[in-house]
């Protein structure tokens, strides 16, 4: 699956960017570099993270993907929140895994960002899939899957119910810092692209990257460890590279100069692919 995707993508890319079309693009807009603009937890520079307000803002700002964090309530509902506790981004306290969905749903997840967001709720995975699939890509992070045994199968089932286990437009990606979880997810969803997350330089060795390439389509490091050599090495193994988290124009420009394939950012408007 991984090699087939790379070959197919390469053929499509070569057809799309023929010499004539490249010349036309350069003449009309300057050289346009293909880079996916990923709204990190939605457009979190402008709206409370991992809420419908943030995801809508990301779509409004023409992001290619929204990035979401998936965890599970005590009673089995998949919910969208980054931290293992609700303390930082809501008016409640406690671990996500110890709270029922009713308790989680009763929380205000918006007022900490601004009065205009008062009453924003923690969304469910179902709500996000139904609202955004077909409108924008969805980069799904399994957050601390070791806390939620079997969450890979639950996520896979939700995608299969919507025929998103074989996305026609390649606009579903699943990623995690937990590599074993991604191996499981790859076996459950062989046609969905898989990403591995890291901020550890130990994971950038030739041996480590070759191991990731056996099951992952994306190697997604923090931008602090990105270099041109790393990007070239990732590409040579048939993977793409998306980097996080951009919160300045300078960081966005650095990653554009490194020729990454995607930029995960709180500010989608900071990513300008034109030279």
Image: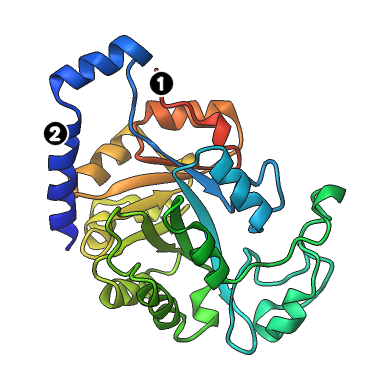
Task: Name the side, left or right, on which 165 lies relative to 132.
Answer: left
Crowding at dot 2, Cα within 10 Å, few <14 / some 14-19 / many 20+, comes out as few
Q: Is residue 32 left or right of residue 150?
A: left
Residue 268 to residue 118: above or below? above
Q: Who comes first in sequence, dot 2 or dot 1? A: 2
Q: Quadrant of the C terminus?
A: top left
**Closer to the observer: label 2 or label 1?**
2
Residue closest to the far top? 27
Q: Position of residue 194 (x, y in %)?
A: 33, 62
Q: Position of residue 53 (x, y in %)?
A: 68, 52
Distance from Cα at disc 2 to Cα at disc 1: 20 Å
Label drawn at residue 15? 2
Q: Could you say which disc has been placed on residue 274 in the image?
A: 1
Residue at the image point whose x is 44% and y is 43% from the top = 64
Mark 1, Cα crowd under 10 Å, few <14 / some 14-19 / many 20+, is few
Q: Tell me the quarter of the image containing the N terminus.
A: bottom left
Answer yes or no: do the residues labelled 2 and 1 have beta carbons within 8 Å? no
Q: Position of residue 186 (x, y in %)?
A: 29, 71
Circle 1 sits in a helix, a strand or a loop, which is it? loop
Measured as percent of width and height from the top left, residue 252 is found at 50, 31
Q: Quadrant of residue 235?
A: top left
Q: Is residue 220 left or right of residue 87?
A: left
Residue displayed at 70% across by 41% down: 46
């Amino acid at each position: 699956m991984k090699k087939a995707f790379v070959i197919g993508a390469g053929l499509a890319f070569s057809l799309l960017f023929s010499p004539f079309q490249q010349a036309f693009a350069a003449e009309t807009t300057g050289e346009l570099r293909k880079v996916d603009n990923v709204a990190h937890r939605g457009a979190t520079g402008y709206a409370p993270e991992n809420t419908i307000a943030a995801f809508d803002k990301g779509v409004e700002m023409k992001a290619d993907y929204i990035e979401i964090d998936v965890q599970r309530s005590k009673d089995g509902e998949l919910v969208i929140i980054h931290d293992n506790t609700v303390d930082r981004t809501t008016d409640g306290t406690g671990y996500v895994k110890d709270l029922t969905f009713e308790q989680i749903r009763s929380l205000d997840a918006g007022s900490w960002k601004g009065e205009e967001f008062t009453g924003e709720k923690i969304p469910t995975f179902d709500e996000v899939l139904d609202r955004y699939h077909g409108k924008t890509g969805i980069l799904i992070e399994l957050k601390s899957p070791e806390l939620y045994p079997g969450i890979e199968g639950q996520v896979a089932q939700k995608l299969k119910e919507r025929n998103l286990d074989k996305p026609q437009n390649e606009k579903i990606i699943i990623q995690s810092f937990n590599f074993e979880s991604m191996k499981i997810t790859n076996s459950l969803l062989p046609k969905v692209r898989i990403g591995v997350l890291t901020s550890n330089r130990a994971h950038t060795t030739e041996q480590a990257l070759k191991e990731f390439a056996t099951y992952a389509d994306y190697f997604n490091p923090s931008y602090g460890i990105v270099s041109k050599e790393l990007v070239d090495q990732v590409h040579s193994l048939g993977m793409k590279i998306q980097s996080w988290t951009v919160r300045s124009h300078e960081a966005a420009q650095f990653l554009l100069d490194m020729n990454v394939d995607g930029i995960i950012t709180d500010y989608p408007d900071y990513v300008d692919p034109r030279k």
